[in-house]
Amino acid sequence: MRGEGLALSTGSWALACCLASCGGLALGAERGPEARAWRYELRIDDALSRLEVDVCFEGPAPPVLAPIDRRGRRFLRSADGPLGPDAAPLPRDADVVFTAHLPPDACVRYVVDLDAAARQRGGITGAYRVGDDLIASTTVWLWAPRPRAPDARASARFTLPEGVVVSPLWPRDAERWYLDARAFELEAFAAFGRFEVRHVGVPGACLHVSLLGRRVAMGHDALSASLARSAGAAALLFGRFPVSEASILAVPTPLSTTSPFGVVGRGTLPTVAILVGEQAAPERLERAWVPVHEFSHLAVPLIERDDAWLSEGLATYYQEILRARAGLIAPEEAWRNLDDGFARGRAGGTGRSLADESRDMRRTAAYRRVYWAGAAIALAADVELRARGARSLDDALAELHACCHGGARPMPGRDAIERLDAASDGVFGRVARAALGSSELLPLERTYRRLGLSHRADGSLAFDDAPDARALRDAITSPPAALDDVPPCGPWYARP
Ligand SMILES: [Zn+2]
């Protein structure tokens, strides 16, 4: 299993806002502008079981305070305001806390039960204890004023018990952290506890690696170096890591698999949580596909969930290609892995078209089908582009990234296809549309012929050494000619 974090629906608070504004108080013009600045003061207890949050609104109070995802409502223990001698429980319903009646410049206090969240079965995508440390998605504990004024500014400060740190989550200076729209619209993964954070440079980026929980057998030096090598492989798509800064949570697990799961959050700062087997050997971890898959997600803008075939297909294709480019696996192994994956993709699925399979994936668990059907589209489009001459899928993705990365809203798949089409002379869309309407995996015979790939009688993959085929395979699995420099890295708020 693997996944990418949520884009959060605004539907849950839209209705609540209407309720909050009943009695003739309409949202928008009549209410006046919402608070222009919100200041969060967050306090966590020594046991990391309870988070107490004061939110102060500059100017008029917003209509409601709502969790950034509906799942968060289950963990709210109290909400009081305005802070001061007249503090009282704030009116609430199942989804939101009503704040419209508060005076200007008011502060409220809400308390989140992190223990209750950690008892749920959300794993690292909810709240999750890792030894004495705690991972908690912002969907569990971040409540936001709604609606959000477009120019609202938000900042936060943590008050922490002795020795406790917060993993890098939002940009910060020595005093405060700064939240933009993405912090309130997209899920991000935070960790609290007494753990080490290392700052690791890769071409074009600084990665802040939080080493959580029990010490893994390989030790922290080898663990950070392994993850850096996986990130270095992801840098071989654009010649630099796809984002200039990211927070990585290394999460030890007693499971015997080297790296069984990872997840990507897209808040103000990208956050990537990666499970690592406690007994894993470093040479196995750096060869593992999960970290490269997760880092590859950052090369593509956040895509709407229904179009998972696109984001997961690209990450699945590049997890193999980029490991081969980095020399972490042999090119032949990458081709075999792709071929095996396509076979699993053909065997999986529920008979729906790929478009429907992708939309229903979380209900039907047709993950293999969707991931590998998407990877087949990526391979076919890449080969078609390269066979034509100058361009490749790398180039088309670089253009998509340049235009659309880092938004606060997920991109509809059709918009991403349009962009990729413009960057590929229509090749990507033509391949994708043929696959999306079909309940069969894209036929790859022509693609395989061009690559010099065929199946022997026993089903194993054979490689034709005809010069054109070999050159095409080599072009796909060769690293880019130039790489960005590795920047000097450290805690960003301490850098000059
Ligand atoms: Zn993925």
Image (cartoon, rainbow, N blue to C red):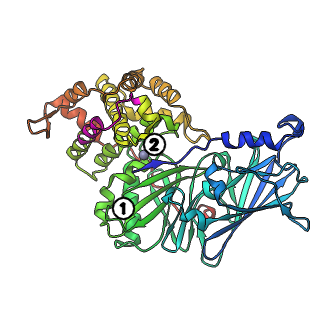
Q: Is residue 169 left or right of residue 211?
A: right
Q: Is residue 207 visible?
A: no
Q: What percent of the width, then of the height, locates residue 161?
A: 65, 76
Q: Is residue 484 magenta?
A: no
Q: What percent of the width, then of the height, locates residue 261?
A: 40, 55
Q: Which residues are magenta?
A: 340-354
Q: Is residue 438 left or right of residue 303?
A: left
Which is the main secondary structure of the residues drawn in magenta?
helix
In the drawing, what numbered circle is on residue 299? none
Q: Is residue 452 visible?
A: yes
Tell me if mark 2 has few (under 14), some (14-19) or many (20+) residues whose alpha carbon lies within 10 angstroms of its own: few
Q: What percent of the width, then of the height, locates residue 449?
A: 19, 27
Check disc 2 and report the residue beneath it.
362
Check disc 1 and report the residue beneath it.
226
Which comes before the other along the chain, label 1 or label 2? 1
Question: Does any atom of ligand 1 lie closer than 8 Å to the CB of label 1?
Answer: no
341 vs 208, nearest the viewer: 341
Location of residue 286 by image quarter: bottom left
284 vs 113, nearest the viewer: 113
Location of residue 478 by image quarter: top left
**Disc 1/disc 2 C-alpha distance (Å):** 31 Å
Give amino acid for label 1.
Ser
Q: At 46% across and 58% down in the image, what residue appears?
A: 201
33 vs 361, nearest the viewer: 361
Which residue lies most toward the bottom here?
Answer: 162
Give amino acid for label 2.
Arg
